[in-house]
């Protein structure tokens, strides 16, 4: 789309498909999802209401505990500069650790390795294999070809 580099190389053939998928997702999200949610949320079954109340009660307790913890940390940091310094140092340390440990791993399993264009070929032949003089091997080379895409097939001499 409007990016360069590796994402452009990977997604260029899929741009139309990607735009169509995003457009369809947008249309569904603004039309079908509100209609379905109105239909689903109208359920007044007592078991569903009890389950909803159960999850609401437990999630409210967890949210209240987290809110209280952060309120105490902020009020302590406002009262003492040493607590604020320790709190900021811990946040910076957590940020640095996440950048060094987590960020290099994120998305790696979804991206294919970049092709560098290099090919390594290893050939094993019989000890008595003869080579025609026109295809004589140069020092350090396996075989030479006139064109990069040309394939040279070396066959052993007939017995």
Image (cartoon, helix red, strand yellow):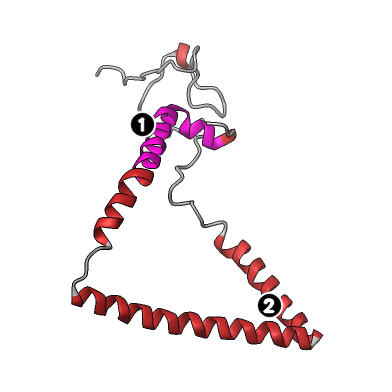
Name the one closer to the observer, 24 or 8.
24
Magenta-drawn segment:
6-28
Q: Residues within 10 Å of mark 1 (few under 14, many from 20)?
A: few
Q: Nearer the viewer, mark 2 or mark 1?
A: 2
The residue at 41%/34% (across/down) is 18
Query: Does residue 49 appear in the picture of this structure?
Result: yes
Where disc 1 sits, the SS reads loop
The residue that mark 1 highlights is 125
Whether residue 8 sits left or right of residue 123 in the image: it is right
Residue receiving disc 2:
90
Q: Secondary structure at mark 2?
A: helix
Quadrant of the image occupied by residue 127? top left
Note whether 43 is above or below 60 in the view shown: above
**139 or 4: nearer the viewer:** 4
In the picture, which quadrant includes the C terminus?
top left
Q: Residues within 10 Å of mark 2 (few under 14, many from 20)?
A: few
Q: Is residue 82 left or right of residue 39?
A: right
Residue placed most toward the observer, 70 or 104: 70
Horizontal and vertical percent for residue 16?
41, 28
Magenta stretch: dominant secondary structure: helix
**Residue at left 79%, top 86%?**
82
Q: Return the disc, 2 or 1, that comes first in the chain's sequence.
A: 2
Q: Residue at x 57, y 85 (%)?
A: 68
Q: Where residue 75 sits: x, y (%)?
A: 70, 85
Residue 116 seen by the camera: no
């Amino acid at each position: 789309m409007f990016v360069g580099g590796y994402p452009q190389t990977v997604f260029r053939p899929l741009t139309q498909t990607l735009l169509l998928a995003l457009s369809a997702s947008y249309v569904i999200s603004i039309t079908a999802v509100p209609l379905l949610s109105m239909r689903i949320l109208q359920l007044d079954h007592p078991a569903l209401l009890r389950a909803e109340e159960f999850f609401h009660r437990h999630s409210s307790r967890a949210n209240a505990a987290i809110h209280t913890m952060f309120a105490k940390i902020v009020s302590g940091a406002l009262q003492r500069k040493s607590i604020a310094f320790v709190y900021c140092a811990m946040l910076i340390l957590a940020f640095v650790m996440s950048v060094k440990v987590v960020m290099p791993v994120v998305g790696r399993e979804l991206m294919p390795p970049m092709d560098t264009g290099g090919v390594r070929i290893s050939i094993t032949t019989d000890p008595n294999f003869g080579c025609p003089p026109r295809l004589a091997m140069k020092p350090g080379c396996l075989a030479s070809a006139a064109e990069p895409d040309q394939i040279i097939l070396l066959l052993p001499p007939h017995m």
